Image: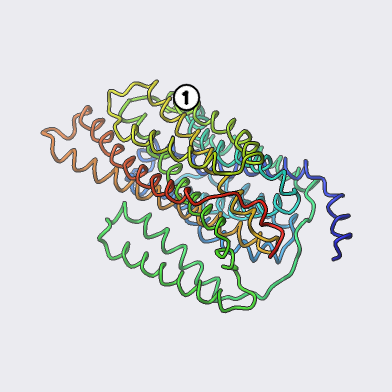
Amino acid sequence: MSATAAQQNKQVIKTTPILISFLIAGFIGLFSETALNMALGDLIQIFNVGSSTIQWLTTGYLLTLGILVPVSGLLLQWFNTRQLFIASLVFSIIGTLIAALAPSFGILLLARVIQAIGTGLLLPLMFNTILVIFPIHRRGAIMGLMGLVIMFAPAVGPTISGLIIGNLNWHWIFWVCLPFLVIALLCGIKYMQNVSTITKPKIDVLSIILSTIGFGGIVYGFSSAGEYGWGSTIVISTIAVGLVALVLFSLRQLKMKEPMLDLRVFKYPMFTMGLLSVFATFMVIMSSAILLPLYLQTSLALTAFSAGLVLLPGGVLNGIMSPVTGRIFDKYGPRRLVLPGFIIMIVMLGLLSNITTTTSIIMVIIMHSLLMIGVSMVMMPSQTNGLNQLPKNLYPDGTALMNTLQQVSGAIGTAVAMTIMSASQKAYLGSVINPSDTSNIRASLAAGVQEAFIFGLIVAIVGLIFSIFIKSSQSKTSSD
């Protein structure tokens, strides 16, 4: 296609309806990542399973994303925008309907996997489409809007689900989502346009197998640690197999003329730094999203609805901040946001690692709200700056890698945090005279959450070190 033809093509693209369709679908998809967290305590009782088993409702979702999203770079070059958007919504609707009707833990877990397939198709498609239809000088603001969805949805998930559980039951978390997904599907059918270039590269089955074993093995290994322990054969072997498969996958991609996932994206230093910053931040987000509801409901003995209200200000602030940080990014670049953002996160995680059964609710609200402000200053600016450095032909690969490692980091963060919390909780209960006493159970969970937040603090410090090397990449996008 000539430059003139491409320009004419761009002029007829109706960006607003496309953006709205993605925002609705993306919000519900990412809301689903954390919506069940507030119900985990109830579901442990309802399905008669342990905390290490129930976490699979979150980590199973993330595991599916970790397996599917790497293949998305290939799918974006084989199927057009409309086909992928409609397919993603159909999977999301089917998964949500099964979850709403689920009579058992196994069926609910299956539903979560089907939901995750929908989200796994949607996320890379959403980012790739935005990069194609919006010019570079508007991307910060648009990615800020995307950030509102990506950060706001998981942040308010526990609040909305807490409200639902307080008045209805956990099934309604999914019934409430269903009409919004149908609306997003109808918007997509009417307004979604094909903006991607279909090149239909050769499908390399071995690359898909290695990618699935690699990303899936690592996520499964970390997620199983809570159930089997870090020294178990299952955990060590699956992580080891995953790492070997990823190394073989990477070597194969570098040798192929048409790789499934083009690893040349790592030649662009700002993409790599952005990826590492996002990796660290998403670990903090997902671990906090599972720790705080458990702490509020167990250690502070709040109802699901009250716990949801405590987390609401942070979620709202996070949503408000994302478009603001997008505009600041467009004007000043990433450094003035990312470095201070990590510093705020480090301070708040340090304070959260000292919470007890006597910590005031006001203090929890303040700490969580400031943590979410720090997150919003890091997440989208790092992501946008990294993707901005890539040439257009590497957008599908860059978005696929960014989203894959984001989900992998979320699964690892959740699994490690829950493992640390459980181990510390057991150690605490083993040191008291009456471990079945309610006050001791509340104190033990608080002690476990403290230890888990220290892990989050270490991750944020590592993220701060990466962020020191971030600089604006906006001038480097035009060339390959």
- Foreground residue, 443 or 164? 443
Q: Is residue 162 above or below residue 383?
A: above
Instruction: Residue at 63%, 39% (x, y): give it.
Output: 326
- Foreground residue, 200 or 348? 348
Q: Quadrant of the N terminus?
A: bottom right
Looking at the rendering, which quadrant does residue 438 occupy? top left
Instruction: Residue at 51%, 44% (x, y): give it.
Output: 33
Looking at the rendering, which quadrant does residue 393 occupy? bottom right
> Which x, y percent locates residue 126?
67, 50
Q: Please, what secondary structure does the residue beneath circle 1 have?
A: helix
Q: Is residue 64 above or below residue 348?
A: below
Q: Is residue 152 above or below residue 401?
A: above
- How many numbered marks are there? 1
Please indicate whether residue 85 sits to the left or right of residue 191 in the image.
left
Instruction: Residue at 64%, 59% (x, y): give it.
Output: 390
> Which x, y percent locates residue 215?
47, 63
Neighbour class for label 1 at 10 Å: few (<14), some, many (≥20)? Answer: some
Identify residue for label 1.
309
Please indicate whether residue 181 sits to the left or right of residue 225 in the image.
right
